[in-house]
Amino acid sequence: MKKTLLYLILATISFQVDAQNLISTSGTSVQDANTKLAYSIGETVVTTYTQGSDQITQGFHQGNTTVSFTSENQLELQLFPNPNNGVFFLSKKDLQPLSYKLFTIEGVLLNSGAFTSLRKEFDLSAYANGNYLLEVLPLGDKTQKTILKINKTN
């Protein structure tokens, strides 16, 4: 009985050592000249401080984490008219070759291809009214994906 109790206490202590880690689905950190705010979705609130109308909740997210990234050149695309009656155009600023895939809102692939011209015409007149998704990315580069929502009406 004493051994079982000892193992239970040791297991509880070892689980509490790892309890300060947080696996979160989302969160961010924002800072200006006077204030820094960091939060995580799914974080347990441990302490709450209130002063007047201000309230601070303190949990396990105590971040000094710095994340940096290099922003790639964004595709400069224009989709018009939107909404449309079945015919719409996609224009771009340069002759960079792009590939496209046209999907229904449910994810069914309707059309795909590539183009290098400054303007590409799409014809949805054979399809039902509704929303469609156009995925556009540079040929051979899957990191600059752009998804545009198209609304076809009569």
Image: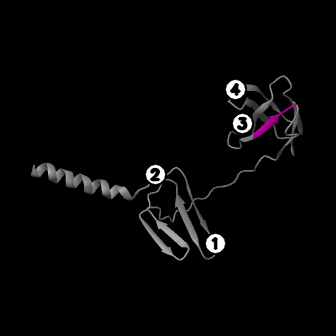
Q: Secondary structure at mark 2?
A: loop
Q: Identity of the amino acid at label 1?
A: Asp
Select label 4 or label 3 by which is in front: 4
Residue, x 56% and y 67% (percent of image)? 37
Q: Identity of the amino acid at label 4?
A: Val
Q: CA separation, marks 2 and 1?
A: 26 Å
**First in residue order: circle 4 vs circle 3:** 4
Q: CA separation, marks 2 and 3?
A: 34 Å
**Pointer 4 residue:** 108
Using the image as rendered, state which of residue 140 and residue 2 is in the foreground. 2
Select label 2 or label 3 by which is in front: 2
Q: Which mark is residue 140?
A: 3
**First in residue order: circle 2 vs circle 1:** 2
Q: CA separation, marks 4 and 2?
A: 34 Å
Res 138 seen here:
no
Q: Give the side of residue 145 with respect to residue 78, left or right.
A: left
Q: Magenta stretch?
A: 148-154
Q: Residues within 10 Å of mark 4 (few under 14, many from 20)?
A: few
Q: CA separation, marks 3 and 1?
A: 39 Å
Q: Residues within 10 Å of mark 2 (few under 14, many from 20)?
A: few
Q: Which mark is residue 23?
A: 2
**First in residue order: circle 2 vs circle 3:** 2
**Pointer 1 residue:** 32
